[in-house]
Image (cartoon, rainbow, N blue to C red):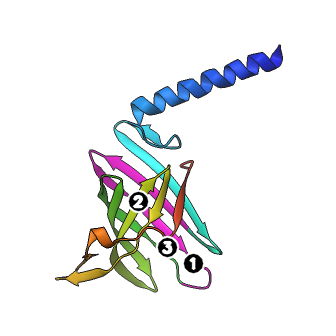
Amino acid sequence: MKSIFFSALAAALALTACNQNKTANSGADSLATSNADTLKECYLATSGKDSAMLHINQLNGKVTGTLTYNFFEKDDADGDIKGSFSGDTLFVDFTFKAEGTVSKNPQAFLKKDGKLYQGYGNIESYMGRTYFKDHSQIKFDQGFVFDAVDCK
């Protein structure tokens, strides 16, 4: 009898959680949280001894947040992101501190199957602004793969 009760309770909670996420988060990952109209998502990636943490805040189509790369035996990079989604791809400018200087580089992440895949491509600089030379040439198969995690 207890197992039936707990199974029913678990099913009811799961159904309620799914329905809340569909309305509050407009189809975003289940680990996302919504505060007012701001959607918050958090992601963690690891590759060998390297790791990266990404916090995203979405409001009115704009994305802000933080991105931290922790590299083994190299300088870390920690800073702010600002940008937007274009379809299923997040394009941001990453302003970060590394090796004692402040830098700004473009970053791209493909959102697929609840994960974010970091993109790599040719970048150029013009009048102090760095950008991807051709968005269609960005590859998403060599960088970090970010898994959704609970925001803390």
Q: Which mark is residue 142?
A: 3
Residue topped by disc 1: 71
Badge 1: how crowded within 10 Å, few (<14), some, or many (20+)? some
Q: Return the disc, 3 or 1, that comes first in the chain's sequence.
A: 1
Q: Residue at x 26, y 73 (%)?
A: 134
Q: Return the disc, 3 or 2, that comes first in the chain's sequence.
A: 2
Q: Which residue is drawn at 53% across and 43% down?
A: 31
Point out the stretch of residues depicted in magenta: 52-74
Provide residue 136's location: percent of width, then percent of height. 29, 68
Number of the front mark, 1 or 2: 2
Q: Which amino acid does label 2 sit on?
A: Leu
Query: Residue 7 lies in magenta, yes or no?
Result: no
Q: What element carries label 1?
A: loop
Provide residue 12's location: percent of width, then percent of height. 61, 21
Provide residue 19's location: percent of width, then percent of height. 48, 26
Instruction: State if disc 2 and disc 1 touch (CB < 8 Å).
Output: no
- Considering every residue shown, the one lying at the far top of the view is 1
Q: What residue type is labelled 3?
A: Gln
